Image (cartoon, rainbow, N blue to C red):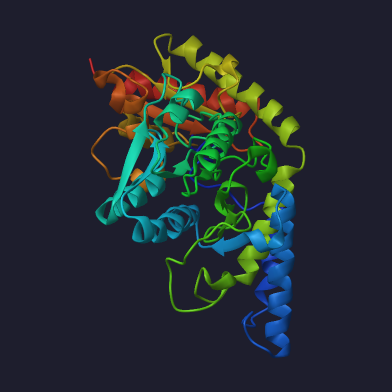
């Protein structure tokens, strides 16, 4: 297979730059001025930065002043959590936050860090498809709950969480609090980094107060992301040393990457339903081929017909095939895959997401993540299945 074109099936980790995003990045690289300067070059850089900010806002149904540029989805999640919760802890003492067991580590670890300052976190379980129950979440909210964070799309098994339904429950709880005289806020954040290519993302329809985006997941450049912060949501910086980004993120703004991100996100919004439908057909064919060649292969996460799985995602276990060995073998055969979020590579423990689904212990280390790009083809799907079959034949433990 070395003579064949490689098949890239790790889009949840990173995507290539689209042509339009590349062109915009190249166009802006010559704009070297500091956007905070008063001279011509600085004013031109500031102008381009604000064009990018407005474009990103329009892509998600927000206002320009609700968009803060950050360096990654991880930083966006940290700013959302620590910037919103820490000052409330200092003002009110012990408080509660709610999340779920399949969140990215850039959600779980900042929450754990704040436990040293008085936060206690309720980590809700999920069902076998990775879905958190809106009703269970509503029941978990108590008088000290100030922050809820539930991802829009899971990066490992592709679960689409019921964010709109959760928001409806939280709206009802907020109304009851107001009537009962509880002065504490209740903020709702979603990590939507994996969503824009495959799911319609509009902050008003979702009803969230904060939302994280990451350019490298939407055919944009690495090193740039954005945090949407609804107007009148009090938040403090976690990175100090400058007054950029409304005082929330010190440091010289990266104008070329912001512009390239804006183009990629605008393109992601265009034709999302058609893109998702086309890619889901290819994903489904890939799974059919895998099952034909490896009948005892197991699909982790939502059933394909459930509507709870994002269009480009499969998570597959082959009994007695160790996942990391499989990824190495697949790579040698020209197919790029992964075992879990790239942020967790190096851990000896099975994926916390797979464990949360209730996968049997003997299968927990066999999960292989396959995430397709928008230009994936039926022949790519067939190649993936054939390479996985060859890998299983070679490396399954007897």
Residue at (30% x, 25% y) in the render: 364
User: Vertically, is 381 above or below 36?
Assistant: above
Residue 194 screen position, x and y as percent:
55, 41
Quadrant position of the C terminus in the picture: top left
Q: Quadrant of residue 332?
A: top left
User: Vertically, is 306 above or below 10?
Assistant: above
Residue at (40% x, 61% y) in the render: 87
User: Vertically, is 159 above or below 195?
Assistant: above
Residue at (72% x, 36% y) in the render: 272
Front position in the image: 85 or 65: 85
Residue 273 screen position, x and y as percent:
73, 31
**255 on left or right of 85:** right
Residue 69 screen position, x and y as percent:
58, 63
User: Vertically, is 22 above or below 307?
Assistant: below
In this view, which residue lies farthest toward the bottom?
39
Q: Is residue 4 visible?
A: no
Front position in the image: 334 or 109: 109
Residue at (54% x, 42% y) in the render: 178
Residue 213 screen position, x and y as percent:
57, 50
Q: Quadrant of residue 308?
A: top right
Q: Is residue 16 visible?
A: yes
């Amino acid at each position: 297979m070395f003579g064949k074109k490689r098949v890239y099936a790790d889009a949840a980790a990173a995507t290539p730059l689209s042509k339009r995003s590349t062109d915009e990045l190249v166009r802006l690289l010559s704009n070297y001025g500091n956007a905070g300067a008063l001279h011509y070059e600085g004013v031109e850089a500031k102008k381009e930065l604000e064009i990018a900010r407005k474009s990103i806002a329009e892509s998600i149904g927000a206002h320009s002043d609700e968009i803060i540029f950050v360096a990654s989805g991880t930083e966006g999640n940290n700013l959302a959590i620590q910037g919103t919760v820490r000052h409330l802890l200092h003002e009110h003492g012990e408080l509660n936050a709610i999340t779920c067991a399949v969140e990215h580590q850039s959600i779980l670890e900042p929450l754990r860090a704040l436990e040293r300052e008085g936060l206690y976190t309720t980590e809700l379980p999920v069902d076998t498809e990775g879905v958190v129950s809106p009703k269970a979440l509503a029941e978990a909210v108590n008088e000290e709950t100030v922050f809820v964070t539930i991802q829009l799309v899971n990066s490992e098994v592709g679960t689409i969480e019921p964010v709109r339904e959760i928001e409806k429950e939280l709206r009802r709880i907020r109304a009851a609090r107001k009537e009962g005289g509880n002065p504490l806020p209740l903020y709702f954040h979603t990590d939507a980094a994996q969503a824009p290519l495959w799911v319609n993302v509009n902050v008003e329809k979702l009803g969230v107060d904060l939302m994280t985006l990451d350019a490298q997941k939407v055919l944009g450049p690495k090193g740039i992301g954005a945090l949407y912060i609804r107007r009148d949501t009090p938040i403090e910086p976690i990175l100090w040393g400058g007054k950029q980004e409304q005082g929330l993120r010190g440091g010289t703004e990266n104008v070329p990457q912001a512009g390239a991100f804006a183009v990629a996100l605008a393109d992601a919004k265009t034709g999302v339903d058609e893109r998702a439908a086309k890619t889901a057909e290819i994903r489904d064919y890939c799974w059919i081929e895998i099952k034909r060649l490896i009948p005892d292969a197991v699909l982790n996460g939502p059933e394909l017909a459930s509507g709870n799985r994002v269009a480009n995602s499969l998570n597959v276990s082959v009994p007695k095939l160790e996942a990391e060995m499989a990824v190495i073998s697949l790579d040698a055969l020209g197919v790029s895959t992964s075992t879990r979020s790239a942020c967790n590579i190096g851990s000896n423990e099975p994926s916390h997401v797979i464990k949360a689904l209730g996968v049997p212990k003997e299968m927990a280390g066999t999960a292989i993540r396959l995430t397709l790009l928008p230009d994936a083809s039926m022949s790519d799907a067939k190649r993936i299945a054939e390479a996985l079959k060859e890998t299983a034949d070679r490396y399954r433990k007897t």
